[in-house]
Image (cartoon, helix red, strand yellow):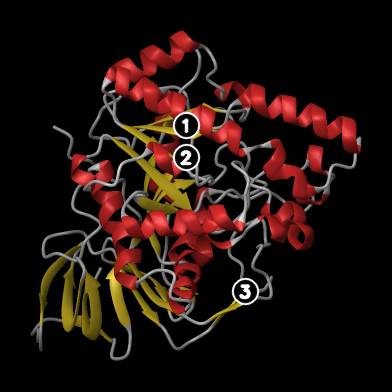
Amino acid sequence: MSAILIKNATIINENKRETGDILINRNRIERIGHNINVSHRCHEINAEGLYLIPGLIDDQVHFREPGLTNKGNIYSESMAAVAGGVTSFMEMPNTIPNAISIQELEKKYNIGQQNSFGNYSFYLGASNDNIEEVKRVDRNNICGVKIFMGSSTGNMLVDREKALNDIFKYSEVIITTHCEDEFTIQENLKDAQEKYGDDIPFNQHHIIRSREACYKSSSHAISLAQEHNAKLHVLHISTKEELELFQKIPLEDKKITCEACLHHMWFSNTDYDDLGSLIKWNPAIKTSDDREAIINAVNEGIIDVIATDHAPHTKEEKSGKYINTPSGGPLVQYSLPILLEMNRKKKISIEKIVEKTSHNVADLFQIKERGYIREGYFADIVLFDLDSKTDVNVNNILSKCSWSPFENTSFNSKVIHTIVSGNHIYKNGEINGEPSGLRMEFNRD
């Protein structure tokens, strides 16, 4: 690993903009300043005209390994991530086998060590009967515990009240939740099947997985967190009603936080007729009013972080009828271009993008020495051009599933360089080097 000197970048960090240089040595940012010169051998990047930000930290991805590697794996999906400006990710436990034990979790960390281009952490999955595993978690060594309070893969639905209470009572790490009330969903599905038979239109997805199902489950999770004084992070908020459950106070004063996902900030239910299964996510994409409320909540500080919920499925799986088509889709490769397109449309500032995808994620999860451009911190850095295009087509999609809901779209910005823990992994549109991401650590003592 040689030293890297970035010259004349427009640095956006901690709500400030300034032109400057950054010297990277080994894994770390050694120096930030102006007119930096070094006497030792150094790889130099001329960043004049480019913007520099801390790498995005995605707190919710599904990279499918082990057991579902026909859809994606740590190697392919982390490659897509760094191309999208994501230098670190937290991956979900609904793989096969489910990561509901420390033993299975460590197997995933071993895969990450060998195959990940980005920095990584993995959630321990909660189940109805693994409270002893939750108690064993090393609070400084994993990102958190994940509860599916709605249907999911295998033994991942936690629907017993005693199990939920135990998890909220005993978890020493942040609890993240997928909140949809399963009984409500099943009742809605029965109604849809009676009306449409086997040909349920995809535009019914947000009615089946309804706003009532989301609100009921989110409010339940929050009541449990309040009862047990637990740290709770509610994932992928999809309705304006749920926003009433969260406070507009500084992040450092919150024990209950929430996340917005890119698809809920971009699409609405009017897009189902054109895109159908390609935008079938759980929770469902809902109305344009919900979308605008979510964007406003991001800007106002009610929603704390932005993520992707990247979840690839094969084209074949996505080509079936509604009832048989899995929910989820690939987004991580276009994380930053999507957000920068929203900036172009004056929906969000670049400073706010940095806050919600880097600073706040690092602070919320108490990630050690990442998420900021600071001397001594790990060198997780993205350089992008606001005047170059990113064309989305099947020939340049890096996710193993080889499709995107954004196919044939051109974004008006482009990720030029991605540096992960001091390694220049993505360079001028090409993967540069081998997997060298590091396991993230946490400061929770």
Q: Residue at x 44, y 70 (%)?
A: 347
Residues tagged 1 and 2 counted as in contact (Cβ below 8 A):
yes
Residue underneath mark 2? 242
Going by the numbered disc 3, the residue's amino acid type is Val
Q: Residue at x 85, y 44 (%)?
A: 321
Q: Position of residue 182 (x, y in %)?
A: 63, 25
Question: Please, what secondary structure does the residue beneath circle 3 have?
Answer: loop
Q: Position of residue 357 (x, y in %)?
A: 35, 58
Label 1 CA crowd tier, 10 Å (few <14, some 14–19, many 20+): many
Going by the numbered disc 1, the residue's amino acid type is Ser
Question: Please, what secondary structure does the residue beneath circle 2 have?
Answer: helix
Q: Quadrant of the N terminus?
A: bottom left
Label 2 CA crowd tier, 10 Å (few <14, some 14–19, many 20+): many
Kindly report which numbered mark, 3 or 2, lies closer to the viewer in this rendering: 2
Q: Quote the CA–CA distance across marks 3 and 2.
A: 33 Å
Question: In the picture, residue 189 is in which quadrant?
Answer: top right
Q: Quote the CA–CA distance across marks 1 and 3.
A: 35 Å
Residue underneath mark 3? 392
Q: Is residue 221 above or below residue 90?
A: above
Image side of residue 312 versus residue 190, left or right: left
The residue nearer to you, when weighing 245 against 310, is 245
Checking the image for residue 191, the label placed there is none
The furthest residue to the top: 162
Q: Quote the CA–CA distance across marks 1 and 2.
A: 7 Å
Image side of residue 420 versus residue 30, left or right: right
Residue underneath mark 1? 218
Kindly report which numbered mark, 1 or 2, lies closer to the viewer in this rendering: 2
Image side of residue 215 versus residue 321, left or right: left
Image side of residue 181 versus residue 426, left or right: right
Q: Is residue 347 above or below residue 263?
A: below
The residue nearer to you, when weighing 225 against 67, is 225
